[in-house]
Amino acid sequence: MTEDVLPGDGTWIDEGDWSVLDIADEPDDEQLRLPVLAVVGRPNVGKSTLVNRIIGRREAVVEDVPGVTRDRVTYEADWAGRRFLVQDTGGWEPDAKGLQQAVARQADVAMRTADAILLVVDAVVGATATDEAVAKVLRRSKTPVILVANKVDDARVEAEAAALWSLGLGEPQPISASHGRGTGDLLDLVLATLPSTPRDDGVIGVGPRRVALVGKPNVGKSSLLNKLSGDERSVVHDVAGTTVDPVDSLVELGGRVWRFVDTAGLRKRVGQAKGAEFYASLRTRGAIEAAELVVLLLDAAEPITEQDQRVLGMVVDAGRALVIAFNKWDLVDEDRRYTLRSEIERDLAHVTWAPRVNISAKTGRAVQKLVPAMETALDSWDKRISTGQLNSWLKEVVAATPPPMRGGRLPRVLFATQAATRPPTFVLFTTGFLEAGYRRFLERRLREEFGFDGSPVRVSVRVREKRTRK
């Protein structure tokens, strides 16, 4: 007898050639509150490069042009066995206007809420008027500040780094973020400076559900996050592609805490994107993979596009719970509503199970309806059907509608088990292959019987192999 071990609800099933053990999913580890280190400075001094060096992987988007980072973005770091959070920020400029003013405001928030601050200055260029303005603000702060002289690639530049004493923030720490020179000593100093516990308004809570906001550029993801949080968590501007990095925010809604991730809008396939857009696309894909629930924003005032379909495909392939939000509903007239109904029937026919909510992130219209839709989707994503209940249902369905014959033979469906949750995954044990159309029929009947609104359902078939008797 062969033996397969499948995750499920702890029930042994014996049938023919199989013994199947269902094992319950383990709960997620609790996320601990960690101190926060903010990395600030004027544009293009190497802040994101330093963040990547600190966390030990290429997460922050880096490109050799100023202003690539715009939001404050949080990553977890570990040095010498101690964990802390690193917050990357956009370039800080005292007299910024428009989009850059919003970027500077995010850096300002990071400086006010962090437990320690790294001020990064380009040692080759020296202290500029902007550096002096930032230093003036930080000297008045009660938060510990470490002055970092970046781009000190060799000993010849160290003399120029010493000139940064003039900023009045103590001894400059000479490093090269791109080459790693001096970063170990800097991190030792960071650990000595960071408190063991964060401020009361720390960024990390305990076990919030992870929600990714995705969609094409300028569809209103950042506006929705700001409306939900009641705060300007993400930079919003009418320039498409304002968000580059995924932005994490803890938001309390409906009596529970959620972790929202505002992602970059996807313009092209990852293989066709270049520079910062390429890495932003990778971050967005990673944010979908790391999420439990995805809220896909579509522009209700515009036709559903190939970009929308591509993002939707990424979510479905990742097996995440899904809510579709039609944003900018305040711009939709009666003619557009009629056209939109046809587009939904044509382009979203394969995700009829996903709840749809019509909202306006700008005005706040109906955004409160997102919470029950998200809760329903996550409940479905976590749902487990007992083996006995599943097989009683299956027996009735197969008796009423047998599978189609294949090769002159009628395959028998012997029994089924739920192999996993997140998403719900079912395995059918049969004597022959089941056509794709019949598997879709069983999925549809599964949904009719047990729900699963907002969650993909996966149905696979395991065919019993004939044993040769010795």
Image: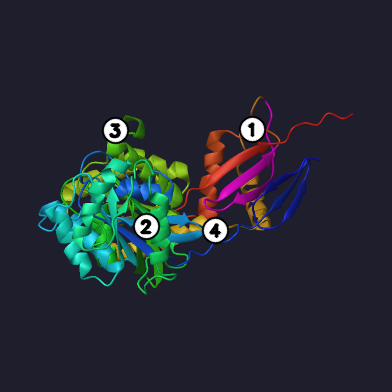
Q: Where is residue 291 in the image (x, y as percent from the top left)?
A: 43, 53
Disc 4 to disc 3: CB gap under 8 Å: no
* Mark 1 burial class by Cα count in 10 Å: few <14, some 14-19, many 20+: some
Residue located beneath label 4 in the image: 383
Q: Quick one: 144 or 329, which is closer to the camera?
A: 144
Q: Earlier in the sequence, mark 2 or mark 3?
A: 2
**Amino acid bearing label 3:** Lys
Mark toward the start of the polypeptide (1 vs 3): 3
Mark earlier in primary sequence (4, 3): 3
Which residue sits furthest bottom? 200
Secondary structure mainly formed by the magenta segment = strand
Q: Relative to residue 276, is residue 149 depicted above or below?
A: below
Location of mark 1 (residue): 433
Quadrant for the N terminus in the image: top right
Check disc 2 and report the residue beneath it.
Answer: 86
Local SS, label 1 = loop
Q: Mark 3 points at which residue?
A: 274
State which tag comes first along the sequence, 2 or 1.
2
Colour basis = rainbow
* Magenta region, residue range: 408-430
